[in-house]
Image: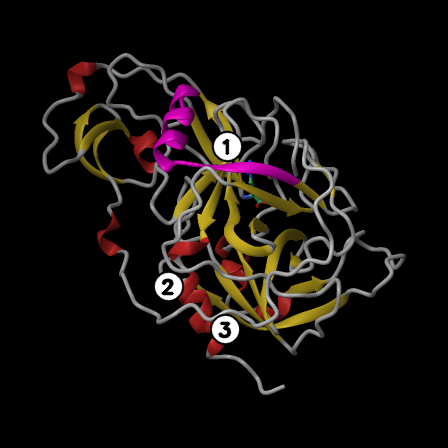
């Protein structure tokens, strides 16, 4: 994860807002969960930019489709009145109060280094989970005795086949046993995917799932749950921490063995959209998403970190405020990481934990 690079390799795709006449557009697409650039530029003539009604926009058909829209009537050769997805089909629901694990959010280690990406220390993020789905890896966060929160896109295809998912808790140096306390391996009994989860060519909507493990974890110094934030709590401007075993550079196939972490500030959705636009990426950061990172890049999550936690320390207690979801390349200028905003779904997560607690 984290890195200081000017490289690429991200995840999702974007689009160009192609109503801009005579503007070049870069088209990004998702390849194996990562966003990559496929072609540019696209020139659009203003002469076609008419005749679209009902809030639709005249766009090059591919750009419309890649941005998650559906094709409407034609407004020129290869151009369509693009029907963009609205939030109408997202059902609001109330899931009750957010109830936290009584032992949540306490790490026995203090943060020592937060400049750039660096090795975490053993037990620093005792809720960090390693989630393996088939051959690909994701992160996760323990929020209850047998409940791990991860990204929806990591497990959506295994929703009905949870036995293909393996979860490791308490790990630090992957595939080694030299740590002072052992890690524990779990199977998954059930995948609860957020009801509004949707794959899109851009960042996925409501990119969150709760994995119910096959048994309770034993809490110890390297295995503890993190707290959930209250519904709709805002962490704008706060410095948070992201952790994972994902790539150290965009596009790299190498993965670190030691858990990495980096400090990144939470930024406003509108600012995140504006920054991306400066790079020709027309992304919509929906309200259940948020961004964290720096104007000039340098520190970020990357491929393989998906599902992992974005965490905030509030007076010594750690909260899960985001879930690594998407990004255009990694650590690039004006392209901060995109996260699921946990305060938009903490009531749903909590309800799923409460409904599946087993007596200890
Ligand atoms: N979707 C990626 C994954 O599957 C996470 C990408 C995060 N990228 C970023 N630049 N923040 O691991």
The quadrant of the picture occupied by the C terminus is bottom right
Mark toward the start of the polypeptide (1 vs 3): 1
Q: Residue lying farthest right?
A: 178
Q: For residue 175, which quarter of the picture?
A: bottom right
- The circle drawn on residue 353 is 3
Mark toward the start of the polypeptide (2 vs 3): 2
Residue at 46% across / 69% down in the picture? 350
Residue picked out by circle 1:
336
Mark toward the start of the polypeptide (2 vs 1): 2
Relative placement, left or right, of 342 versus 171 is left
Residue picked out by circle 2:
195
Task: From the top left corner, tell me how far across and down residue 52 is, in percent.
Answer: 12, 30
**What stretch of residues is rendered in magenta?**
262-280
**Mark 1 residue crowding within 10 angstroms, few (<14) / some (14–19) / many (20+):** many
Task: From the top left corner, tell me how far across and down residue 119 is, in percent.
Answer: 76, 41
Q: Secondary structure at mark 2?
A: loop
- 64, above or below 43, in the image: below
Asked whether mark 3 lies closer than 8 Å to ligand 1, one says: no
Q: Secondary structure at mark 1?
A: loop
Give the CA separation, mark 1 to mark 3. 31 Å
Q: For residue 200, which quarter of the picture?
A: top left
Task: From the top left corner, tell me how far across and down residue 70 is, in percent.
Answer: 26, 41
């Amino acid at each position: 994860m984290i890195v200081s690079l000017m490289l690429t390799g991200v995840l999702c795709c974007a689009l160009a807002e192609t109503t801009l006449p005579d503007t070049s557009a870069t088209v990004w697409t998702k390849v194996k969960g990562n966003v990559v650039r496929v072609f540019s530029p696209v020139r659009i003539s203003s002469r076609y930019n008419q005749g679209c009604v009902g809030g639709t926009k005249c766009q090059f058909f591919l750009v419309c489709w890649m941005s998650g829209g559906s094709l409407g009537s034609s407004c020129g050769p290869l151009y369509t009145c693009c029907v963009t997805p609205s939030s109408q089909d997202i059902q609001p629901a109330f899931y009750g109060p957010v109830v936290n694990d009584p032992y949540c959010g306490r790490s026995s280690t203090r943060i020592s280094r937060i400049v750039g990406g660096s090795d975490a220390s053993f037990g620093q993020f005792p809720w960090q989970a390693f989630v393996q789905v088939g051959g690909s890896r994701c992160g996760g966060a323990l929020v209850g005795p047998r409940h791990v929160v991860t990204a929806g896109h990591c497990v959506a295809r295994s929703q009905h086949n949870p036995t293909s998912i393996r979860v490791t808790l308490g790990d630090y140096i992957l595939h080694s046993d030299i740590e002072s306390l052992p890690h524990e391996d779990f199977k998954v009994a059930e995948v609860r995917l957020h009801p509004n989860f949707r794959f899109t060519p851009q960042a996925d909507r409501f990119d969150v799932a709760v994995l119910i493990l096959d048994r309770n974890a034993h809490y110890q110094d390297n295995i503890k749950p993190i707290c959930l934030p209250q519904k709709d709590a805002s962490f704008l401007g706060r410095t948070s921490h992201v952790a994972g075993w994902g790539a150290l550079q965009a596009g790299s196939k190498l993965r670190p063995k030691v858990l990495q972490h980096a400090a990144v500030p939470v930024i406003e959705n509108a600012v995140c959209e504006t920054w991306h636009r400066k790079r020709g990426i027309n992304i919509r950061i929906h309200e259940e998403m948020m961004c964290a990172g720096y104007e000039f890049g340098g520190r970020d999550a990357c491929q393989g970190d998906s599902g992992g936690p974005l965490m905030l320390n509030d007076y010594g207690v750690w909260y899960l405020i985001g879930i690594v979801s998407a990004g255009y390349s990694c650590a690039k200028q004006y392209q901060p990481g995109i996260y699921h905003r946990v305060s938009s779904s903490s009531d749903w997560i909590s309800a799923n934990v409460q409904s599946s607690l087993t007596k200890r």
